[in-house]
Image (cartoon, grey):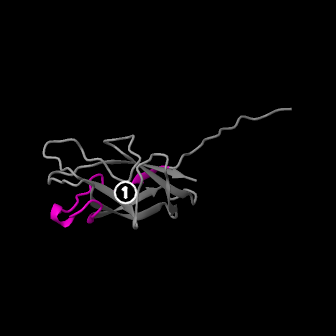
């Protein structure tokens, strides 16, 4: 018995995030959030990927983690600790009308990757979290992890 040499090359899927790295939210007034739990729209963005054209039709899911508080499992995004930081408010990222939980293991299906691209509209809202709120800067950050099935 004789075997000839052969070569095996595994080619991984290569994707690029098309979501902007920084999303500027509109400036709002604390007066517009009079009580705990009241919210106001802050902005919108599209969560998207662009991949090689020859990728299979994967089902794509995402999970988000709070950069400034990685152990955060709530739907309230932590604000960066900086001078002039706002208090008594938080940010929420919404998938439709549902607030995202910032648990790295929690994933949400976007849909199927077709023709090398996928995108999903998202929104961000300010939400009052404290009886006393003070105006200031509201900077936050998320880490997004995509999975392909």
Outermost front residue: 131
71 shown above or below 107 = above
Res 29 visible: no
The magenta span reads: 14-42
Which residue does the image show at 46% across and 62% down from the upper left? 118
Magenta: main secondary structure equals: loop
Outermost right residue: 1
Outermost top residue: 1
Q: Position of residue 130 (x, y in %)?
A: 24, 53
Which residue does the image show at 38% across and 53% down from the upper left? 75
Marks counted in the figure total 1
Label 1: few (<14), some or many (≥20) within 10 Å?
A: some
Which residue does the image show at 75% across and 35% down from the upper left? 4
Q: Nearer the viewer, residue 35 or 39?
A: 35
Which residue does the image show at 23% across and 49% down from the upper left? 139
Q: Position of residue 28 (x, y in %)?
A: 17, 63
Q: Position of residue 41 (x, y in %)?
A: 27, 66
Task: Specify whether residue 3 is painted magenta.
Answer: no
Q: Is residue 98 left or right of residue 135?
A: right
Res 33 visible: yes
Q: Is residue 96 left or right of residue 40?
A: right
Q: Quadrant of residue 9?
A: top right
Q: Position of residue 131 (x, y in %)?
A: 22, 55
Q: Which residue is mark 1?
A: 18
Task: Specify whether residue 37 is painted magenta.
Answer: yes
3 shown above or below 40 = above
Which quarter of the image is occupied by the N terminus?
A: top right
Q: Nearer the viewer, residue 87 or 77?
A: 87
Disc 1 secondary structure class: loop
């Amino acid at each position: 018995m004789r075997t000839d040499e052969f070569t095996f090359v595994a080619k991984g899927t290569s994707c690029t995030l098309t979501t902007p790295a920084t999303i500027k939210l509109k400036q709002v007034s604390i007066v517009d959030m009079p009580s705990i739990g009241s919210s106001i729209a802050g902005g919108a963005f599209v969560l998207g990927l662009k991949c090689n054209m020859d990728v299979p039709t994967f089902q794509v899911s995402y999970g988000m983690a709070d950069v400034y508080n990685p152990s955060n499992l709530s739907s309230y995004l932590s604000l960066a600790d900086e001078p002039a930081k706002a208090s008594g408010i938080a940010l929420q990222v919404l998938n439709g009308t549902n607030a995202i939980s910032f648990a790295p293991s929690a994933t949400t299906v976007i849909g199927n990757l077709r023709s090398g691209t996928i995108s999903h509209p998202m929104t961000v809202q300010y939400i009052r979290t404290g009886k006393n709120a003070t105006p200031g800067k509201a900077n936050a950050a998320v880490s997004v992890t995509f999975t392909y099935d």
